[in-house]
Image (cartoon, rainbow, N blue to C red):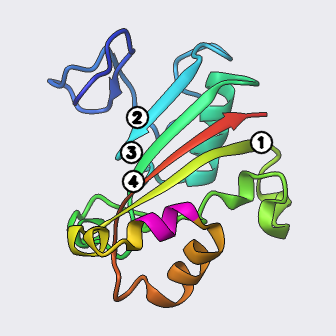
């Protein structure tokens, strides 16, 4: 476990450098509402049993104005499928249900996040050819890439930053 300075690290596995042992599949997490200004879930969300409930819990922990940072493999990357503990294989639009428009599926959750940034990292060859720049610079190109190109021009990792509203 790599911990940010001043952070409270949590894990379910004893023997790690975690400050608090808890299973992220059991709710609520052992913290008060709005306990944190920022929640970082680095290679976590793909392991939980319920992404929607986990995002709601992140919202509770940060409170309005709090930040949630998520890093997860893109579903076209080999690492998304080679780890048998990965339950979810996500893309750059997987969290749209929590947005203002909520993709027409607002009934899944009442919790809302404002998307601050989404960054998709591609495999090095495609990055060198400029695809990563296009995917991250132009939202319409990212949509085109996700719909038609991502199985050839494969993604690697996605970085999301949200603000709880």
Choose mark 3 or mark 2, whichever is in front: 3
Whether residue 142 is situated above or below residue 120 in the rendered picture: below
Range of the magenta residues? 133-137
Q: Nearer the viewer, residue 6 or 123?
A: 123
Dot 2 lies on which element? loop
Task: Tell me the chief SS of the magenta region.
Answer: helix
Q: Residues within 10 Å of mark 4 (few under 14, many from 20)?
A: many
Q: Which residue is mark 3?
A: 44
Give the image quarter of residue 20.
top left
Q: Which residue is mark 4?
A: 72
Residue at figure coordinates x 83%, y 46% from the top left: 110
Dividing the image into 4 quarters, which one contains the N terminus? top left
Relative to 29, is 159 on the left or the right?
A: left
Residue at figure coordinates x 77%, y 43% from the top left: 112
Tell me which label, 4 or 1, sits earlier in the chain: 4
Cα distance, mark 3 to mark 2? 11 Å
Q: Residue furthest left?
A: 15
Cα distance, mark 4 to mark 2? 19 Å
């Amino acid at each position: 476990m790599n911990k940010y300075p001043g952070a409270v690290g949590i894990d379910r596995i004893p023997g790690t450098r975690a400050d608090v042992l808890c299973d992220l599949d059991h709710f609520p997490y052992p913290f008060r509402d709005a306990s944190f200004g920022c929640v970082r879930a680095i290679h976590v969300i793909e392991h939980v049993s319920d992404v929607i409930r986990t995002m709601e819990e992140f919202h509770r922990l940060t409170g309005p104005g709090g930040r949630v940072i998520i890093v997860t493999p893109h579903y076209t990357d080999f690492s998304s499928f080679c780890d048998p503990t990965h339950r979810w294989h996500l893309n750059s639009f997987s969290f749209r249900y929590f947005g203002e428009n909520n993709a027409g599926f607002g009934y899944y959750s009442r919790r809302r996040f404002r998307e601050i940034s989404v960054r998709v990292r591609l495999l090095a060859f495609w990055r060198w050819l400029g695809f990563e720049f296009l995917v991250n610079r132009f939202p319409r190109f990212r949509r085109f890439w996700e719909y038609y190109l991502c199985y050839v021009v494969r993604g690697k990792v996605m970085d999301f930053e949200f603000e709880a509203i």
